[in-house]
Amino acid sequence: MSTEHLRGRFQKDTDRVAARYIASIPFDQRLYRQDIAGSIAHARMLGRQGIIPEGEAEAIISALAEIREEIDQGQFHFKVELEDIHMNIEARLIEKIGDVGGKLHTARSRNDQVALDLRLFCKEAIGETVRGLKGLQAALLDVAEANIDVIMPGYTHLQRAQPVLLSHHLLAYFEMLQRDVLRFRDCLARTDVMPLGSGALAGVPYPIDRDFVAQQLGFSRISQNSIDAVSDRDFVIEYQAAASMAMMHLSRLAEELVLWSTEEFGYVDINDSFASASSIMPQKKNPDVAELARGKTGRVYGHLLGLLSGMKGLPLSYNRDLQEDKEGLFDTVDTLHASLEAFTGMVRTLRVNARRAGQAAEGGYLLATDVADYLVRKGLPFRQAHSVVGRLVAYAAEKKRALSHLGLEEYRRFSDLFEADVLQMTAGASVAARSVPGGTAPDQVRAQVARARRAVNDE
Amino acid sequence: MSTEHLRGRFQKDTDRVAARYIASIPFDQRLYRQDIAGSIAHARMLGRQGIIPEGEAEAIISALAEIREEIDQGQFHFKVELEDIHMNIEARLIEKIGDVGGKLHTARSRNDQVALDLRLFCKEAIGETVRGLKGLQAALLDVAEANIDVIMPGYTHLQRAQPVLLSHHLLAYFEMLQRDVLRFRDCLARTDVMPLGSGALAGVPYPIDRDFVAQQLGFSRISQNSIDAVSDRDFVIEYQAAASMAMMHLSRLAEELVLWSTEEFGYVDINDSFASASSIMPQKKNPDVAELARGKTGRVYGHLLGLLSGMKGLPLSYNRDLQEDKEGLFDTVDTLHASLEAFTGMVRTLRVNARRAGQAAEGGYLLATDVADYLVRKGLPFRQAHSVVGRLVAYAAEKKRALSHLGLEEYRRFSDLFEADVLQMTAGASVAARSVPGGTAPDQVRAQVARARRAVNDE
Amino acid sequence: MSTEHLRGRFQKDTDRVAARYIASIPFDQRLYRQDIAGSIAHARMLGRQGIIPEGEAEAIISALAEIREEIDQGQFHFKVELEDIHMNIEARLIEKIGDVGGKLHTARSRNDQVALDLRLFCKEAIGETVRGLKGLQAALLDVAEANIDVIMPGYTHLQRAQPVLLSHHLLAYFEMLQRDVLRFRDCLARTDVMPLGSGALAGVPYPIDRDFVAQQLGFSRISQNSIDAVSDRDFVIEYQAAASMAMMHLSRLAEELVLWSTEEFGYVDINDSFASASSIMPQKKNPDVAELARGKTGRVYGHLLGLLSGMKGLPLSYNRDLQEDKEGLFDTVDTLHASLEAFTGMVRTLRVNARRAGQAAEGGYLLATDVADYLVRKGLPFRQAHSVVGRLVAYAAEKKRALSHLGLEEYRRFSDLFEADVLQMTAGASVAARSVPGGTAPDQVRAQVARARRAVNDE
Amino acid sequence: MSTEHLRGRFQKDTDRVAARYIASIPFDQRLYRQDIAGSIAHARMLGRQGIIPEGEAEAIISALAEIREEIDQGQFHFKVELEDIHMNIEARLIEKIGDVGGKLHTARSRNDQVALDLRLFCKEAIGETVRGLKGLQAALLDVAEANIDVIMPGYTHLQRAQPVLLSHHLLAYFEMLQRDVLRFRDCLARTDVMPLGSGALAGVPYPIDRDFVAQQLGFSRISQNSIDAVSDRDFVIEYQAAASMAMMHLSRLAEELVLWSTEEFGYVDINDSFASASSIMPQKKNPDVAELARGKTGRVYGHLLGLLSGMKGLPLSYNRDLQEDKEGLFDTVDTLHASLEAFTGMVRTLRVNARRAGQAAEGGYLLATDVADYLVRKGLPFRQAHSVVGRLVAYAAEKKRALSHLGLEEYRRFSDLFEADVLQMTAGASVAARSVPGGTAPDQVRAQVARARRAVNDE
């Protein structure tokens, strides 16, 4: 059997090269469960509405369930000449139950059928994505809690700026991932729309019950415009945009793990089981998972831009260009899920080198802002205090000494507001002082961890 | 005055080339209203909390209001050597009220300040974007209602497929824009977060009241992690992603208006006031607004990619790379708003050529699906009906005759299920038959117009 | 056997999830021929230079040839735990000939090895790409020659502008593809550089002969900086940039074939064997190959942007992010080659509807520019002539008459420079008059076809 | 004066919103010199060929020169209602010399005119780009020479791998920039094509001399197909693709300068004049130029994507979408040139901390590969040597001792091939041993510097 039956008015078979070019079965076979679920709901509705005899509907449904089993078991032979998953399954259906199988496509088109399949796929993907994000959030919270009081240098411009809690720093990633969770959920609301009944583009001339089909398949709403329903891929693009942002977040975490596991920073040790060895340099332990995720971020961006470019300037309604929606989406979903899974393991097994992080936070000039704030509290306008401390730091730097190694008389050369208590400053005190909501003080961070735990556990 | 006061420990002025390279004042001056509003709220809070004397807070607030007036009136001289809008305003403040002005920056950093300014800007932009989208929706509904029963060919693959109502086709764009409205509103929820109090990255060691500042500035929430708050530009990317989809929708409408106003299609006439003339061919009327919007879609995509790429792999917290968030955002906002405004006028003045559209829908083979459905209703399985009609169309095409010009006996050569009523088929009947929710039947489309009106008017 | 031997200092095996994440063998096995060719050349050089005994080099070379045969025959079992194609082959080598196999990696690293493999792959790909481009050029020339004198409307802004030869229009695509050919050849010059000998990053401490290896493998030059050689993927990006432009050209041709095969334009008929049928509308013949190529253009853009994003901000030298270079490249190469092949068949079998094209070029106002030029030749400044004809066209349009249906007295109402000969204007005369180099006159187009033939046949 | 004269058949003025949307004069005024140069060459040719009287050509040319002077002096008033630079200049020309000015547009269209202007602009831009690239190359060579023997750790995966010369590392950037130079030169060859004479799309019906115009304007060739000539923007895209790669190279150098100037690495000190201060942390010196260039890389990528997307699927010939080619190009050119200029200054003033770089290269396990190669030279197959050294490093790491601090007996626990000379290994010896072409040995690097100098100076 071939698509011959589709080609009624055509006088020639598809060119072999063209057939291969056009066929989507090599990748859309991944949608077989969604396709069969949609067909079963559609057949049930056709029978219930009396559009086809109920008995025939039952026969179709049983055969479809068998076909699903065949594919599950790897016993189904997909044929390129049948182009896509829809025709492969329909052809097998007709093979199994004869002409009655040809009634399944009543009141339906491949245009609304593929829109349905893809929406079902995206809904499931979003569920898994959110679970993956929460898994990584939980791992970050575990590491934050286990190292709740570890101090490290906070950076701006990759220069040491002020001491922060490492747990506070990790919670920044919790916040990013939390926005991702919310974005995917917003995306779900626009994905959760049942398009079947739109036909090729104009709706169908049969007394169908779209709400019944929606309810069977777990959709909250039905689409409101048949032309839009077969032309729309916004939900795919929106998934890809949300995925791009999530990968961007991972790429930032990746960058920091790469940095922190260098000999120069040395704040963390990536577990051997998430690192790889060199083919030539036996001493190397390379943070490959982090590097790859950073690289794969570009790939996910590329899929987003590919589809945006592909949709640009397309007239309504369905055009074959839309077939290009799938491979990029599948790869985006797979890449994001694999990255989340690998990161969850890598983060969970991360070893923090509290000593090195703490030492780095004590030395040098990280308390300079605190010194300026000290002067402000003594009444100096901030801008002048900033200027005084700037000169003080320049002096210390020239002497190659840390601020903590200066004596009071040296401080007082720059302002007589300095008193003995300026020598008591420590990274710990600096951190503790920043006890505003969202700040790095231990009490604030503990409260944030608790809030974050609730958010992760909240369905 | 220069940034000298900032460069306490530096021994050299900024290189002239580097200063120009680094300065953001040529574009971030656009944020002066947001910057001053934020500073006023911050000063008021500092006074209220006793961090600075209330009287000094009042002096700062009055001077800031004067500075805003100076900029409004074009009497403010922006200096490149002061780098950015923040330092330009602070320097003027100190110029006006002396050292007290230097207290404004207490418990604040440019890092949280610029995050605040940009969030205020985005919140306002989203409001205007939604108004622009609704304006175009209203124009589409007007044209749909004025031409509610006009029939045209519906297209798939740009081939005539089935008759549809032109109003139904226009409503497809209403749906797209409605998704855009919802997406921008979702984006607003994540933008509406007040970052001030995050300081440079770690929070601030002063008893500030972040909620008061949020309330003064109309924010619903405050940020929960200071490191994230100064590192995050998700809200900008999310605006750009939503804008990319909105422009993509406009590009599709643009493509159709370009097509429909060709001599070949001829379904609409773009008003002279939205078209342009040729420098060499006097007969030309070019759909320039539509073409440009199609072209500008790429530009908006580019800004999205630019920022996504720019954020990839950045370690926390603030890095100067983030300064590149603004120009692309500003251009995205301006391009989208200008495009929506131009389209609203162009659509509102569109003249529909109902006669040509109707003729195109009657001729040829657009009713072939209806003929197949006719056979299905007579009991033939859809797939066989499809095959019969395929041969019928091939026969007619070879004779170069429309289906409506075939006689009953010719129909019956292909199936004896055909009876005299098959000759009664019209585009109007075809359209009317598709009376499912979301279908192209006039009753359905009227209901959709009513629903759409409510959505547009709904705040 | 596992990568155990690589993990000397590691205490743990790679995590299962991480191993799958890191492994490149699922896609880089495609490089086995290049990898083995490189290893053979390397082994031969090691023996020749006395770095390993010549007999051992011979044993390695023989075993490698056998391994290639095993893979050719599908008898090789690739193992994910061996990560990549390099380790899979080396492990098999050692399995076959024992410890001697462990000498192959002397004076080499996977970093320079993979750079070599990829450069060999790209060189071959470019050769095939150029052949594909020339194949399509030849098909375009065939259609142009077969329809050398067919007149059609030339368009600007998709509005009919001036008559042109369809052959001239097709030759525009020849020019685009010719630039593509040259761009790929320029890219080849920068790809044709032999990186082996760069080691991990610093060069190798063995008396190797890099020029010998280059000559064995058919490279023109060797790389000049070992750090650059293992960090550089410019040649991949440059291929992808050239491919993006080539796909953009195909997308424009695709757009025109879609337009021209609509009922509205009707200038060409795509052969049934390159079109597809509708699952619901029996009358449809859809230009799927053209649509898909248009859609796939976005995909190729995406791969370009993905790699550009991925390379942004990477420190030297090799980082694992670079592994992401391959899948996008492979898909780009495959997509471009498949598109060129499909287009070559589609173009070659295209049927031109000369009558419809000619009629469209005669009617309406396409000769308006010629009328303006007529007045210029009578002495009127062009800008005034343009204005006169503008009014003339407005008059005719209001009367709904073509220019050719106006009488001389009507012409003379707008300028008394008009004389009887203005009524003799035809599309054919218009075309013939544009006999400047590059113009649409038949003599010029014939000359261009001849020139183009020579370019295609020229190696 | 308005474009009234262009709107002969139109009954309405352009809508105010639409006019602003369509106008290109806000940005294309930048092309005035190119536009006037093209018009002068065109006018001279028209006179020379007798298409207009020579005296009139002279009058036009003189007036155009005056207009250029007016614009140079800032005395020209650009009008939005005249849309673009072409009409602004032509209108002023007619204002100055009356109807004769209306003859300039004979045998020309804005379509070929703007193609000419843009090609002239790109040719000049490429010249400046190449000069900018060479400037940075020269600065890199200066720093390399001044620090020719400084040893630093070479990195893979950002892990210390093997000692290299810092000069060798900097020369890697020379290589990248050299490829950029060659790519821009290849791009120049395809840009250097004179399009005038293509008219609106079909050529012109006048006896023009295209070669004369080309020679006047310094072009090597004329375009060969008029339809292609007005539709083609490949040269813009190709510039943008080359610029994207160049910016990517700068982003990598930027990343390294950011890393190397951290407290953790400390290999270089960026001159104060290329760094900036913090508004809150007085001790900070931020590598803003490097960070911004890294961020601007995304922006340049965005422009490339924008135009690629914009061109996708455009039918021939000219469409108004093409107007979107300019702003992205201008910004790309400006961004690249500014970045090159800023980097040249920053690199030239870089201070290298030879001591810290050298210490980092000595310690730890950077000589492990050398130890493995030592064993290979004693006859052990590389793969086994690698394994032995892996265990040796694991032993040393557990003892927290560098390889250089192990005693011979400890070495011999892992292989009895070790002898006393294994203790003599140094970073200097390691570097010197890599004396293959392209390797990091001092003699090789000196030779490369000499070769590079010649390439920079070579025109």
Image (tube, coloured by chain):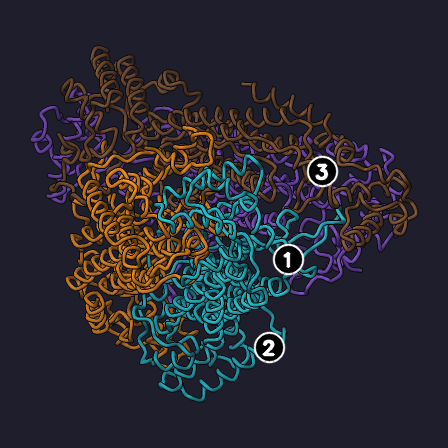
Chain colours: A brown, B purple, C orange, D cyan
User: In the rendered structure, the residue with mark 2 lies on which chain?
Assistant: D
Question: Image quadrant of residue A171?
Answer: top right
Label 3 residue SS: strand
Residue A35 visible? The answer is yes
Image vertical order of residue C160 relative to residue C291, above or below: below
Q: Is residue B32 above or below residue A446?
A: below
Crowding around mark 1 (Cα neighbors within 10 Å: few <14, some 14 to 19, many 20+) is some
Query: Does dot 1 land on a helix, a strand or a loop?
Result: loop
Task: Kindly identify which numbered label has been placed on residue D183.
Answer: none
Q: Earlier in the sequence, mark 2 or mark 1?
A: 2
The Cα–Cα distance between marks 1 and 3, rounded to whole angstroms, is 26 Å
Is label 1 in contact with label 3 (beta carbons under 8 Å)? no
Give the residue number, with chain letter if any, for mark 1: D353
**D129 left or right, relative to A260:** left
What secondary structure is marked by label 2? helix
Q: Nearer the viewer, mark 2 or mark 1?
A: 1
Q: Looking at the image, is mark 1 or mark 3 nearer the viewer?
A: 1
Indicate whether D182 appears above or below B172: below
Q: Nearer the viewer, residue C88 or B64?
A: C88
Q: Amino acid at mark 2?
A: Glu
**Which residue has dot 3 on it?**
A163
Q: Residues within 10 Å of mark 2 (few under 14, many from 20)?
A: few
Amino acid under label 3? Answer: Pro
Residue A154 is drawn in which quadrant? top right
* Kind of residue sitting beneath label 1: Asn
Instruction: Give the CA separation, mark 3 to mark 2.
Output: 59 Å
Report the front residue among C92 and A207. C92
Q: Marks 2 and 1: same chain?
A: yes
Residue at image mark 2 = D70
